[in-house]
Image (cartoon, rainbow, N blue to C red):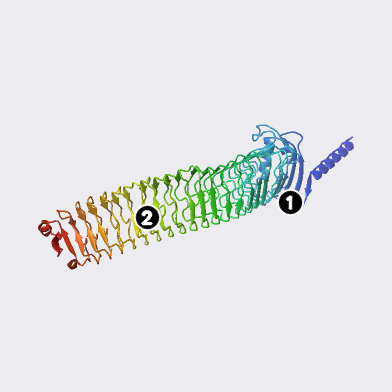
Amino acid sequence: MKKTFSTINRLTGLMALLIVQSILVIDSATAQRMNVTTDSVGTLAAQLPDTIRFKVAELKVSGPLNGTDLKLLQQIVNRTKTNKKVEGECLVTSLDLSEARIVEGKAGMKTETNTLPSMLFSGAKSLTKVVLPATLINIGKNCFAGCQELAEVTIPDGVITIDNAAFKDCISLRTINLPSVLTVVGSSAFENCQSLTAVELPESLTELGGSAFNGCKVLTTVTINGNIKAIQSNTFQNCQALSQVTIPESVMSLGNNAFRACKSLQSISLPENLNEIGNSAFEDCTSLASVELNNVIKLGSNAFEKCSSLRSIDIGNLKKMGSGVFKNCLSLNNASLQGDLSELSSDTFLGCSSLNSVTIPGQLKTIGSHAFDDCKSLTSIDLPLSLTKIGDHAFEKCASLKFIVIPNKVKSIGNDTFENCTSLDSVRIEGFIEEIESDVFRYCHSLRSITLPVSVKKIGSEAFEECVALTNIALPVTLQSIGSSAFKKCAQLQSIVIPPAVKELGSDAFRECSALTSADLSVSLKSIAGGAFAKCASLREVTLNSPTPPTLSRSSFKDVVLGACKFYVPKGCRSTYMQDKQWQKIPQILEK
């Protein structure tokens, strides 16, 4: 009887050995392949005992799995180091779950039916190949995020959701075949998949999350077949190799940074129903040469900034636009903006050095600061009659601009508006402007003629500095103040009449006006600041209309040939001037 039992035991051991051999295949001295099948949930640990669970490189798991099973699987697959003291230990490189089935439960980790839980294999840096369960419906958030060696993923046909960051930072993932029933690709789902070359999104797709393919640097082709309403923020940002994109007609808006820095994108066909393009949506798309924007209503800030190959823009129904929309579009030579746009925002065409033709809406009320700054090729522009405000630096460095007419509703012209417009020859201001702000026409070297409205009360500092071609200017009778250096170095200015209400001439106001021969000063003048007429070498006649001597600085007439210059004062006022210590130094004070 004992012999019989001994024989049975030997047979049992032999069968067990055969079973182990059937599921454990030695691939090399250190890499093993194993197939494991569970009959019920929670039994994976029994199938993968401590002695072998960390000695498997290629693992296939079949059967039902709950949270306890997945927790163990996570511990096995996500290991990043081996114990060198244990012979045969290795890291998992391949995982096949095609015949596994995930069931709902709370043990180990919370699970939902046919759903891979969030973070399940996140950071599994040795994993190169994954086959997902055939019954799978959802891939959870960050499920494979950071699997840097993952190059091949088989997603079953039934998956409808790939959640946020599911495959983020899978930098070795080269291809991905998305199931035909897929409806949702979450935010950052494939962000920074730097080896991914092509993507086709199915017709079933209804949601494409922000940053979904952000940073996929070698992605060249994207086809979106789905019925999505929007391409969200950052979706294809920094896809530097992207050259071909197909966008469905259902798309009505592009989010912020949607295609930012897609440097290989030469053209893109936008849907007819597209009405909104977000901030920086195409910023730094340096190869983009053409784009149709006929039905766009809203353009976000910097939407096409640094699109250095873009040559022309034609928008027919624009209602709102942010700042810097076409900033530094170096090749842009023609722009037509039509619609109910009331404000051309700041920096709109800043640095568009090739822009030579521009049409702006007839309803426009405001031109923002730096709107046309450094548009070196712009020779002319028709400002709409509805215009009321021109912002600071709006046309600064428009070196080819030759003339400008400012409409009669304009009430404000900002600082430096036409500074360095070196070809500007004539200016007519028809609006009721009270102040010519600082530096408005500074360094307009060709300016010969300017018409100021009767409403002007103040001329700001450096307003006409170095307008070397200006020979004369009629100052309005309402003028009350002339700022420092206002007409400094106007080398051809020959005479000046200061209106009666002006009380002060700012420092260096007419300094180095080398051709100035006569100055007729106001009756209300109280002060002639330092350097006001310094280095006016041709000055021969100054008429003072105030009976009370205005205060004088030592440098007010510095380097003027005083012996050759006559100062005329009102009749009966010479003695008053001669008694003033400051005016006593003037050799020729005469009564009219």
- Above or below, 476 against 588 in this view is above
Asked whether residue 415 is in view, the answer is no
Q: Residue furthest top?
A: 105
Of the numbered discs 2 and 1, the one sitting upstream in the chain is: 1
The three-letter amino acid code for the residue at tag 2 is: Val
For the residue pair 369 and 39, the one nearer the viewer reads as 369
For the residue pair 123 and 252, the one nearer the viewer reads as: 252
Q: Is residue 231 above or below residue 382?
A: above
Which residue type does callout 1 highlight? Answer: Ala
Q: Which residue is mark 1?
A: 31
Q: Is residue 421 left or right of residue 33?
A: left
Q: Quadrant of residue 539?
A: bottom left
Residue in view at x 64 percent, y 35 percent:
109
Residue 565 visible in image: yes
Q: Are marks 2 and 1 in contact (CB under 8 Å)?
A: no
Q: Nearer the viewer, mark 2 or mark 1?
A: 2
Q: In the image, what residue occupies the spot 31% across and 64% down?
A: 492
The foreground one among 338 and 474 is: 474
| Image side of residue 452 versus residue 37, left or right | left
Residue drawn at x 45%, y 47% as measured from the top left: 345
The tag on residue 487 is none
Quadrant placement of the N terminus? top right
The percent position of residue 444, horizontal first and vertical second, equals 37, 59
Disc tally is: 2
What is the CA distance from the residue labelled 2 to the residue labelled 1? 83 Å
Secondary structure under the numbered disc 1 in the rendered image: loop
Q: Position of residue 468 (x, y in %)?
A: 33, 63
- Pinpoint residue 42: horizontal percent, then vertical percent: 71, 34
Q: Secondary structure at mark 2?
A: strand
The quarter of the image holding the C terminus is bottom left
- Residue carrying label 2: 427
Classify 10 Å Cα crowding around label 1: few (below 14), some (14-19), many (20 and above).
some
